[in-house]
Amino acid sequence: MDNLNLQTQITAATIAAVSTPAGVSGIAVIRLSGNESGRICNQLFKPLSERFKPALQMQPYTVGVGYWYDAEQKHIIDQVVLTYFAAPNSYTGEDLYEISCHGGQYVKQAILESLFALGAVPAEPGEFSRRAFINGKLDLTEAEGVMDMISAESSRQNQVALQQLRGQLAKEIQSVREKLYRLMAQIEMIIEFPENEDTPEQREKILAAINQIDRTLSDAVASFAQGRIVREGLHVVISGRPNVGKSSLLNLILGEEKAIVTAIPGTTRDIIEAQIILQGLSVVITDTAGLRATDDIVEKEGIERAYRAIEKSDLIIYIFSPENEELWFEDLREIETLLERNKKIVLIAGKKDLPDHKKLSDWLNQHVSTLEQNLDIIDFSKFEDQKAESIKKYILNYFESLDGSEGDSIMITHLRHHRILQKTLEQVRQAQQAFAQEIPLDLISGLLQAAAEELAELTGDQVSEELIETIFSAFCVGK
Ligand SMILES: Nc1nc2c(ncn2[C@@H]2O[C@H](COP(=O)(O)OP(=O)(O)OP(=O)(O)O)[C@@H](O)[C@H]2O)c(=O)[nH]1
Ligand SMILES: [Mg+2]
């Protein structure tokens, strides 16, 4: 890492970007990072008074107030506040300056151009964080936490992002890796000095340590069931035949007339998506076109979109209507197909005020109870006036019923992490079995080694350029 560090410090260009959003704001922040940043700021920034120093004489982690000049140093562009973070104790690990200027379009553009004119280059998306990673300021999971923090919209998203950004996942992974290396060292001792070390007690100890690693990894892997949903939002799709009341239900949950409701079957065609927050959990509810065979090309496209939304959903609310009794069996077939694709479905007997509602309700209870566990029926009769509340409660309960993490332990939220942890766990389990079957110790040590290397990819200690590119290019410019 040190060599790499040195090299980037010598060769990396000084980069600049606006870190605050596009558009007009009271204040905007422009960041400049790299070896040349002090020199560039020194030429363009003139302190307002004796109290403030030129950029190159500023103490690290202090601010200066002054005027910002254009590249010819003839015209003042703005009055700004300059903050100086010195290498290596800055976000990027390089010399870094933040220019807080007024947030108008012209000011931001003019200041950026003055920086480019003096040798800075535009930062790529995520380049500040990428440099932080290369300079050892952040590991990959912490960098991903930074990105999640920026996109967090709910308190639970905020909390899991914080957990990663603070390095809790990184620490946990590091500790598992250390345990694996310690085990390998113990096994090495047995191989070297079997007469002293290869005792039943010693083997017992090693097996216990492998089991403990297994538990830690299994817990982390299991927490992904909830973790993924916390980060991406719980995707709930409202489905059913045309005219059963899907859009009405969406509007009821949202408390606003978002979707068009009419008595004409086939009203909804496009996907209608809305986000709600339930006790800090981000939930995306999607209303879809009613499912039926049709020759109408617009409706057909709508139905295809409905199926795509269903495919991506975590939970399907499927509404039956007491009208059209002859179609109930067809609905049931639809549901069976969805269940075969491992979908979680909750059935609602809709239009409670209609005379045949009870008949529908009984029919459902009769025909559905024989089906599998991924299926539920919500009975609104108990809730009457609080349909929306009971649905929301149901959705939240469904989430809470998924595998989660215990207490303060780590919650895995990224598919990338989940995949790596799963592979690591498989290797640890192989080692466990090999141990029980008295397979030669050097082979067991090899499996543990493979597991430890797998984990190195999670934190980025061993990682391909391609993966780094994929991760950081998803960041915003200026971060
Ligand atoms: N009686 C009764 N009518 C309802 C109820 N819910 C909805 N409706 C009526 O049923 C009709 C269809 O409602 P929508 O919410 O548009 O149904 P949809 O399932 O979205 O229909 P499509 O978009 O065509 O698939 C409208 O006339 C609603 O007023 C209910 O609980 N009771
Ligand atoms: Mg509709």
Image (cartoon, rainbow, N blue to C red):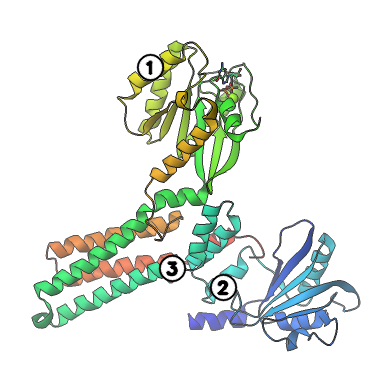
Res 173 → quadrant: bottom left
Q: Earlier in the sequence, mark 1 or mark 3?
A: 3
Using residue 471 as the reference point, say whether residue 446 is left or right of it: left
**Amino acid carrying mark 3 in the image:** Ala
Give the residue drawn at x 39%, y 51%.
Answer: 404
Give the residue drawn at x 42%, y 24%.
Answer: 334
Contact between labelled residues 2 and 1, with CB atoms less than 8 Å apart: no
Residue under circle 1?
Answer: 362
Residue under circle 2?
Answer: 132
Contact between labelled residues 3 and 1, with CB atoms less than 8 Å apart: no
**Amino acid carrying mark 1 in the image:** Asp
Instruction: Say if disc 3 is inside 8 Å of ligand 2.
Output: no
Instruction: Say if disc 2 is inside 8 Å of ligand 2.
Output: no
- Regarding mark 3 in the picture, which secondary structure is present there? helix
Q: Quadrant of the C terminus?
A: bottom right
Above-or-below relation of 26 to 41: above
Above-or-below relation of 319 to 76: above
Marks 1 and 2, how far apart at CA: 62 Å
Q: Is residue 433 visible?
A: yes
Residue under circle 3?
Answer: 170
- Regarding mark 2 in the picture, which secondary structure is present there? helix
- Regarding mark 1 in the picture, which secondary structure is present there? helix
Q: Is residue 301 visible?
A: no
